[in-house]
Amino acid sequence: MSETVDLPPSDAVLGLADVRVHTTRIVAEMRVIDMHTHLFAPQFDQLTRWGIDDLLTYHYLVAEAIRSGNVRPEQFQALPKASQADLVWQTLFVRNTPLSEATRGVITVLTALGLDPMRRDLREARDFFHAAQPAEHLAWVLARARVDQVVMTNDPFDARETPVWRQRLAIDARFRAALRLDTLLNDWEAARPALEEAGHAVGREVDDQAIIRARRFIDDWIVRMNPLYLAVSLPAEFAWPAENPRARLIRDVVLPACREHRLPFAMMIGVRRGVNPALRDAGDALGRADVTAIHHICREHPDNRFLVTMLSRENQHELCVAARKFSNLMPFGCWWFLNNPSIVSEITRERLELLGTTFIPQHSDARVLEQLLYKWAHARRDVADALAEQYTRVIDAGRPVTTREITRDARRLFVDNFRQWAPPDRATVPARPDAGVAANRADPR
Ligand code: FIX
Ligand code: ZN
């Protein structure tokens, strides 16, 4: 962990009476890196999502609207997007009070934009977004959310995305890539056509030749995207060590590539995809995973850095303890179903108590631009409360804290820990022909 963080110039010694208000202010003002989103830079025109219809058809809200409104998923999906948004608005905001975190988020967004959240229809909101200039609006949202950099989720198997990368356009510097490997690691059969199209044809088995070719594919995409990290989401059943195609690909392709390119590997563990396929995007759930897999992978690969988030609340304490044992492990975020104030508060407190400031408290996972306005506002409040409580305990124990220390701590949590794990200007290691073979030979594990 970094030990040389500059302290800001102004300083004030704080006691019990004022520590909370200063912590809240400092955390609210801190400019952050959003290290995992599903947002896209403007160059990915087809994939950018913003505005009221996208906000209201977010899959978190779709699941709630179908449940609350007693609509069949097929009926809902057959509607055009604007009608789906109307139905969600009527169901969750007019006929019901927006109590859930996802609905409260929409209220925070509308309020931030100066729109009236009590309207019975979406006319005012639609007019507002119709008049907005996309470039100015993007700049305004990022400034208001105090997000300096947004990390995208970039899928080299997504045919809507890959043509943009191949055009070698200059990507808006406020957005950085994360190379997402779910298809490669979780669905080899679906990965094969893309590998073949990229000139790295592979068979049905993950054999020695497949390892070499998958590595070339990854090297090509690392050069093309210049990502900050490689990432995968994994099921609750994820085990390590294991003898299966995924484990072989992680061990012989992904981890050697991460070492050579000096990139961390993000594992997002605990998702159960498609438990209700009729709900499509909204149909995923979660399961409790086995944290010993993380112990083993971190211990076997001390030269790899791991960013890990887990989806089950029941895994959070074990993940903290694992991070105490392995300094190549960085827990991050309160992912998806955990991103609710009660759970964010609990997890952040647990992490502060066990890890000090050596974790990344939150990412937004935003899919729609304006969600940054609520996800960050809500997270800052919960993290500030947890921090303030911890400072209060330190003061109670007999040591005051200063505003410079609080600023340093908040910067570590929201910026420096990620920067340290994924430096923006990593010296790029040029991809060598057959780098995968060499790396695999040198690392027979
Ligand atoms: O796998 C992921 O990155 C998940 O965050 C998403 O797939 C999920 O649908 C989501 O949006 C959660 O917030
Ligand atoms: Zn995500």
Image: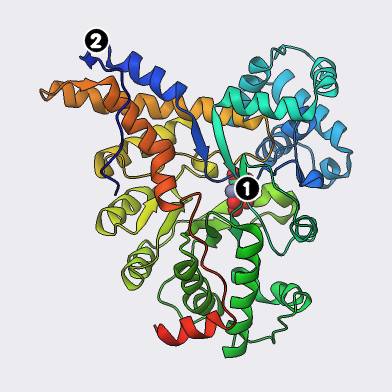
For this orientation, the residue located farthest to the left is 398
Q: Which residue is mark 1?
A: 152
Q: Position of residue 393 (x, y in %)?
A: 19, 25
Residue 309 location, x and y as percent?
45, 51
Instruction: Report helix, strand or loop for mark 1.
Output: loop
Check the image and report above or below for 18 versus 379: above
Q: Which mark is residue 373?
A: none
Q: How would you rate the neighbour count of disc 1 (Cα within 10 Å): few for under 14, some for 14-19, many for 20 or more?
A: many
* Residue 43 picture quarter: top right
Question: Percent from the top left, x then y, of residue 334?
Answer: 47, 42
Query: Type of residue at label 1?
Result: Met
Look at the image and tell me in which quarter the C terminus lies.
bottom left
Q: How many marks?
A: 2
Q: Amino acid at mark 2?
A: Ala
Q: Nearer the viewer, residue 254 or 182?
A: 254
Q: Earlier in the sequence, mark 1 or mark 2?
A: 2
Residue 100 visible to an observer of this rendering: no
> Gap between marks 1 and 2, in whole Å?
41 Å
Q: Nearer the viewer, mark 1 or mark 2?
A: 1
| Residue 419, above or below 382 | below
Which residue is pictured at 51% across the width and 26% down the height? 378
Disc number placed over residue 17 in the picture, else none: 2
Which one is nearer the viewer's eye here, 289 or 420? 420
Identify the residue at image location x=74%, y=25%.
136
